[in-house]
């Protein structure tokens, strides 16, 4: 098996430490959520804000997330 087959199909991640809320940087970023089961999903801040509001912090949001694959909750 070649080295490229071992790599994830997701794009490289750059952590934006200055982002704390969904409305930071005008919501111009993607939220990547990963679970211990290996499931990964990228979600736009706009889609999340429709459910929880723009002022939600990423820390508060993390406690509300549940994996769509294994149903594991973070909180």
Image: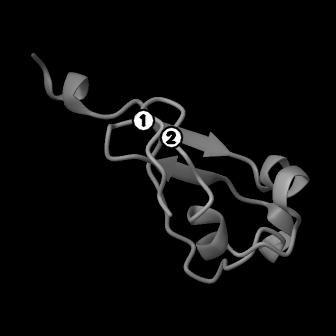
- SS type, badge 1: loop
Q: Is residue 3 above or below residue 54?
A: above
Tell me, for residue 39, which label it has, or none.
1
Q: Position of residue 25 (x, y in %)?
A: 80, 73
Seen from the viewer's position, the closer of residues 33 and 8 is: 33
Residue at 83% across, 60% down: 52
Q: Residue furthest left?
A: 1
Q: Quadrant of residue 8?
A: top left
Q: Earlier in the sequence, mark 1 or mark 2?
A: 1
Residue at 84% across, 71% down: 23
Seen from the viewer's position, the closer of residues 47 and 75 is: 75
Residue at 79% across, 76% down: 24
User: What residue is shown with label 2?
Assistant: 67
Q: Position of residue 4 (x, y in %)?
A: 24, 26
> How is the model colour-coded?
one colour
Q: Residue furthest top?
A: 1
Q: Are marks 1 and 2 in contact (CB under 8 Å)?
A: yes
């Amino acid at each position: 098996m070649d080295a490229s087959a071992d790599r994830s199909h997701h794009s490289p991640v750059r952590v934006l430490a200055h982002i704390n809320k969904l409305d930071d940087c005008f919501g111009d970023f993607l939220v990547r959520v990963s679970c211990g089961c290996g499931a990964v999903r990228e979600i736009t801040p706009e889609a999340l804000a429709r459910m929880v509001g723009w002022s939600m912090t990423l820390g508060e949001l993390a406690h509300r997330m549940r994996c769509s694959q294994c149903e594991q909750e973070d909180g």
